[in-house]
Structures are given as structure tokens and as C-alpha cells.
């Protein structure tokens, strides 16, 4: 009877973060915004934290400040794929801002896959990296003729999606990494989110947009305070770019 129990309920493989950290933290920044280069990047560098910047390649900063994005990559930050034109489904609530030519409801799966592939090619020319991660614009997964995300998983080590954190690290699917997209969060909300990941031994995945400017913003003050808190708790939380965290998780799972 005991043997049957163990066969039916195998023990979960042990998983440990580096340096016995309680949890991992991934900070990311969407859309290649000026405020990220002006405020987020210098703050991250002051603390020696590596983050991920999901570049929308049609952003004006890719022409006006290209050298700064190249420098960010050399400094250890990941330049992630966030498409070229940021197509989103205009049919969903609150999407009045989506321009007709970027309405994903009118795009075929083949068209969005081509765009994402082309974005990977541009990013390769930008930083020389052959592996990276992806955050779908607006978190959307469907074009007019079906789910495109399922068709691009092979292009990326991991993909971030809006969603609640997993309760155990063994439940984490790298190509469906649940992520919080906070707007005007307080310091307490941010630290609570990380502390909950610490209780569960999981990953706190956070995507910002504007930092002290632009849109969907976190204030520069709260962002700075959050980094200072993470710096003071380095012994508890491992913060790195999403590509590095994902590679570590993949490596640990390949050992079992």
C-alpha cells in the first residue's frame, strides 16, 4: 500500500535558487520608452541590477537613442522582443487607442509570426544575442485566425503573460510565466508582491512601462525606493534579467 502511494504521488524534485535565495525577481520594462532610459536604466545600474527591456522596435528611441540601448545590452541587461509595431486587439475593452493598421484582430497568425521573427533579427543585429524572451503586446495571444503564441514558443526561452503567481516553482511554465503589470503602484504593493514569492520560493515577475514619465507609470521615487529595498534584501532575493533566470530554471530542470 505504501509503495502504491509513492508511485502515485512522486516526490517533487528539489529546487533551489542560487546562494539560498528565497525567491527570484525579474524586473522588466515594456515599449522602449524615454523615461526608461532617463530614469529606470541609470537607477538599475547604480544598484548593479540586471533587468529586461522589452523593445517595441517602432519606438522613436530605437532611432534617436539606439546607442543607449546597445550600451544597456553591454551592461548586462536583456533586450527582449515586444514586436515591431505593438499590434493589439482593438475589439477588447479599453482599446480605443489601437490604430487600425495595428489591430491584431485583422492580422493573420502568419503576419504576426513574421513580425516577431523580424523583430528577433533586428535584436540580433543590435546585441548579438541568439536567445531571448518575449512579452506579447497587450498580453494578447490571438490574431484573427487563431492563437499565435503557441506558434512562437520555439523562438524564445520564455514568454511572460499577465497572471497570478504560481504557488510552487514546479508549477511554473516558462512560456506562460505569470507577470504583474502594475500602474502607479505603492512601494508596499511592490514589496508585498516580492515577499509573497519569497514565502512560496517562486518567481516575482514584474513588468513596468513608464518610470517617472510616459504612461502606465510608476513614479521615479517609488521605483528608486523599490530598488533600494531589493538592494537591502539581496541575501533573500535573486534579481537578474529574465533570460538569465529562465536559463537557470531550465538548467535545474534538465538535471532531474
Image (cartoon, rainbow, N blue to C red):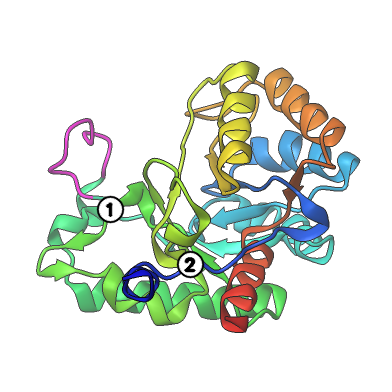
Q: Give the quarter of the image for residue 153.
A: bottom left
Q: Reading the chain from its start, which is encountered first: label 2 or label 1?
A: 2
Between 5 and 201, the one lying in front of the other is 5
Q: Position of residue 7 (x, y in %)?
A: 36, 76
Between 171 and 187, the one lying in front of the other is 171
Q: Which mark is residue 140?
A: 1
Which residue is at 47% across, 65% downward? 174
Q: Position of residue 146 (x, y in %)?
A: 13, 68
- Which mark is in front, 2 or 1? 2
Q: Residues within 10 Å of mark 2 (few under 14, many from 20)?
A: few
Q: Residue furthest front?
A: 1
218 displayed left or right of 116: right
5 displayed left or right of 84: left
Magenta range: 89-98
Q: Position of residue 16 (x, y in %)?
A: 69, 60
Between 101 and 160, the one lying in front of the other is 160
Dot 2: element: loop
Dot 1: element: loop
47 displayed left or right of 2: right
Q: Quadrant of the N terminus?
A: bottom left
The answer to if 79 sits in the magenta stretch is no
Between 194 and 91, the one lying in front of the other is 194
- Residue wearing tag 2: 11
Q: Position of residue 235 (x, y in %)?
A: 84, 42
72 up-or-down from 3: above or below: above
Which residue is at 56% across, 50% downward? 60
Amino acid at each position: 500500500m505504501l509503495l502504491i502511494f509513492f508511485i502515485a504521488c512522486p516526490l517533487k524534485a528539489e529546487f533551489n535558487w542560487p546562494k539560498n535565495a528565497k525567491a527570484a525577481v525579474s524586473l522588466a520594462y515594456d515599449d522602449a520608452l524615454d523615461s526608461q532610459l532617463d530614469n529606470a536604466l541609470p537607477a538599475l545600474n547604480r544598484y548593479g541590477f540586471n533587468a529586461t527591456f522589452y523593445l517595441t522596435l517602432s519606438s522613436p528611441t530605437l532611432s534617436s537613442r539606439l546607442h543607449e540601448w546597445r550600451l544597456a545590452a553591454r551592461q548586462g541587461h536583456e533586450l527582449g522582443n515586444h514586436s515591431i509595431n505593438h499590434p493589439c486587439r482593438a475589439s477588447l475593452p479599453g482599446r480605443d487607442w489601437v490604430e487600425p493598421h495595428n489591430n491584431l484582430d485583422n492580422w493573420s497568425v502568419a503576419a504576426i509570426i513574421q513580425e516577431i521573427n523580424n523583430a528577433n533579427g533586428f535584436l540580433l543585429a543590435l546585441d548579438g544575442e541568439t536567445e531571448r524572451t518575449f512579452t506579447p503586446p497587450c498580453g494578447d495571444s490571438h490574431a484573427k485566425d487563431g492563437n499565435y503564441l503557441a506558434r512562437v514558443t520555439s523562438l524564445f526561452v520564455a514568454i511572460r503573460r499577465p497572471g497570478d503567481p504560481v504557488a510552487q516553482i514546479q508549477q511554473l511554465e516558462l512560456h506562460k510565466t505569470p507577470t504583474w503589470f502594475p500602474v502607479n503602484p505603492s512601494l508596499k504593493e511592490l514589496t508585498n508582491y516580492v515577499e509573497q514569492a519569497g514565502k512560496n520560493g517562486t518567481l516575482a515577475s514584474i513588468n513596468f512601462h513608464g518610470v517617472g514619465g510616459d504612461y502606465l507609470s510608476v513614479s521615479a521615487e517609488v521605483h528608486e525606493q523599490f530598488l533600494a529595498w531589493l538592494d537591502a534584501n539581496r541575501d533573500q532575493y535573486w534579481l537578474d534579467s529574465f533570460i538569465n533566470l529562465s536559463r537557470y530554471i531550465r538548467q535545474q530542470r534538465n538535471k532531474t
